[in-house]
Image (tube, grey):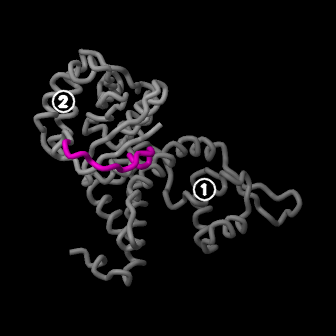
Amino acid sequence: MDALRGYGELGLGSRLKRVSEYMMKETQLVYNHFNVDFDPYLFPIFNIIANKKGVTNSEIQNSLQFTQPAITQAINKLNDKGLIIYTLDKSDKRKKIISLSDKGYRTLDILKPIWKTIDKVIKEYTLESSSSLIEHLNILENKLNAKSFSSTIINNIKMDTTTANFEIISFDKQYAKDFYELNVEWLKAFFYVEAYDEEVLSKPDHYIINKGGHIFFAKLNDQIVGTVALMPIGKEGVFELTKMGVSPKHRGHKIGQKLMQHCINFAKVNSMPKLIIYSNKKLENAIYIYRKYGFIEIPVEENCPYIRCDIKMELVF
């Protein structure tokens, strides 16, 4: 049992300290992985110096509201690492101006993409809504315990370095097997394969392509890592955004969102009146993303083709 959780609001300070220490430790693992000689505790002061392009000790303190000893200690560490230089203020020789050294600027260039990824991962980890700070801490710590913070950042950075080889392509019969396997894997992970799923997935050309539908694939380094379909329904030019699946090892890199944006752009260009999504409310993150892209909930019809469906959404153009 987690004793700190049992303390409720009384343990808030200790909970925040624990989360802070964990994230600092994990961030250090990221720096070590990429051979960057940097300490996560130095980030706020190093970043202030980089942004100000010349700042005094007092200005750093006013900006961050840190104690003077903490600032002095960090500045000394930055100096020991050769990341900063001192110059005298031209108008007041008693003042020392702190700036990044050449090594500091080189280090900054290396750190920027890492910080960008850290920022993105933290946003993903803290995306859930909650009614109190304690509840939000519970959700955050559950995610941190379920999936290593450092490995998530490292994997995201590795993905970011390969985006030049990422593309979304249209259906080709050679990828029919990928379409089937990606969707079946997803269905088995969250639900089960219904008879209707099996029929459509086994014959995508018959049920989707030959009826005027479209299937797209996310291709990364010549490997199919995701797919989605726009399947025509009814006789009014309406399409169902469906059969979206992403390879398990490539999830968490917004490939699904890229596929969705591609479908929305495609629908607009081709003057489709609206897109329909059938889903299940237990897929909270997916529902959140659908709403983020403008889909709104509408009633589910009695003859819905999916047994698992308990929510229907539409995006009208």
What is the span of residues highlighted in magenta in the rendered image? 290-303
Q: Quadrant of residue 248?
A: top left
Q: Is residue 21 above or below residue 148?
A: below
Tell me the tag on residue 46: 1
Residue located farthest toward the right when viewing the structure as drawn: 91
Indicate whether residue 288 is drawn in magenta: no
Relative to 24, does residue 175 appear above or below in the rendering?
above
Indicate the amino acid at tag 2.
Glu
Q: Amino acid at mark 1?
A: Phe
The residue under the point 61% across, 50% down is 82
Q: Is residue 31 visible?
A: no
Label 2 element class: helix
Residue 257: horizontal and vertical position, in percent? 39, 39
Q: Is residue 230 visible?
A: yes
Residue 199, horizontal then vertical, whole percent: 14, 28
Return the disc, 1 or 2, that comes first in the chain's sequence: 1
Q: Relative to residue 263, is residue 10 depicted above or below? A: below
Q: CA distance from mark 1 to mark 2?
A: 48 Å
Q: Which mark is residue 181?
A: 2
